[in-house]
Image (cartoon, rainbow, N blue to C red):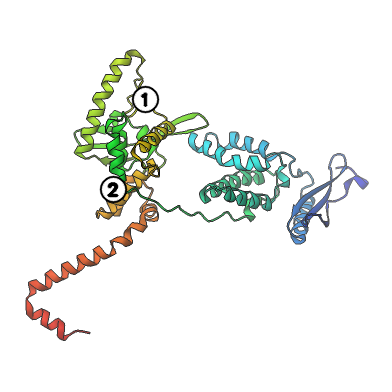
Amino acid sequence: MPNGPQAKAPYAVEPRKLDSGRWKGRVVRYDPETGKRHEMTQTFDTKREAKHWAETEAAKYREDPNRKPPSEETFASFFKKWLEGTAVGRVRDTTFLTYQRYAAHCLTAFGNKPLKTLTPADFQALYAQMLAAGKATSTVHHTHVVAHSALDEAVNWGLIPFNPTDRVKPPRVTSPEIVLPTKEEAMRLLDVAETDRLKALWWFVALTGCRRGEVVALKWTDIDWGQRTVVIQRTAAEFNNLLTVHDTKTAKGRRTIALSSYLLNILNEHRERQGVEREFFGKDWNREEWVFPSERGTMFWPTNVSAHYRRLRTRASVSTVRLHDLRHAMATAWIAAGVPIKVVSERLGHANISVTLQIYGHVLPNMQHEAADQMDALFVTARAADGPQNDRKSVRDGP
């Protein structure tokens, strides 16, 4: 380290109030090699925060004179390095794409800002803008989670003194109310689907409650015709014109589902029609054995399935019924029919029963009267079997 005046110790400078009303924390340090003076700054909502930051940073430099100042690197530049250097290899392809999708909101808002200038107010404002634009609370929450993970690493790498998202509370995630299709709407859909090339796909979703990606990634080898079951073990997803197929996200997602005889008949008819297409295209037919492929046997992209479904529902005049609503309708029907919630959870591939209850708990209160009537019937029958003497005793022992 240089001698004399070049060896001055770092020190905090009194915070400066900005025209915006915020406060700029200031730290003066000297380069350990050249002795050149540098002033580092960080803006805060209050003078107290700015002063605390400056004093803390100055103390850190006094303890370690060789410590590097906060990085001038932009958020966009850092995020790219973090994503490619840290996330790749640690998360699956679809998770990697999900990180990109949610981080896009941050990159658009302040991707060109240096990391060290990011503040809690930047993220709070971004979340408010997203909500005002109609983004779901879950989207804002996931954006916060990705930004927080990335900036935690920036702190670990010594690029910034603290994670600004630690001081921000994302909005509470609220689940939109599930609007189920009526029995009449569902029947209109399936009636129109009777002549549709993907008739079996719509019936499969309606009777098993499987997700779109799970159905698209289904292979004929997953079906056990003798046991009347199907194994759900992979799913398809797409983002930015990239299609990926991978194992189900959780162990509970991989599951064996019993199939009804009616659905098996529909699948068998579908397989026979698919055989005609295979013969027609000959060597141009894809050999991956997807159950619901395109006309040439290639995987049907999830977005194309949704587009096909929208045309179907238009013909059926049920424009408000989404494809995923068929899954909700099936789950609700199971619960209303008295199927144990654990069985419903297993068929849907939920991680645990609490997820099922969180989504479909609104169905259970509607079953309270039914449960009460069943208990009445049970005890009335039992008392009747004991004879009229027991009934008279009940009256005498009344309230």
Residue 47 horizontal/vertical position (percent): 77, 60
**Residue furthest out toward the top:** 283
Q: Secondary structure at mark 1?
A: loop
Label 2, residues with CA under 10 Å away: few <14, some 14-19, many ≥20: few
Residue 190 horizontal/vertical position (percent): 28, 38
Position of the C terminus by quadrant: bottom left
Q: Quadrant of residue 256?
A: top left
Residue bearing mark 1: 294
Position of the N terminus by quadrant: top right
Residue bearing mark 2: 183
On residue 328, the disc is none
Residue type indicated by callout 2: Lys
Q: Is residue 59 visible?
A: yes
**Residue furthest out toward the right:** 4
Residue 223 horizontal/vertical position (percent): 26, 33
Q: Nearer the viewer, residue 300 or 16?
A: 300
Q: Quadrant of residue 156?
A: top right
Which residue: 73% across, 46% down? Answer: 117
Q: Secondary structure at mark 2?
A: helix
* Image vertical order of residue 395 relative to residue 218, above or below: below
Q: Nearer the viewer, residue 322 or 227?
A: 322
Residue type indicated by callout 1: Ser
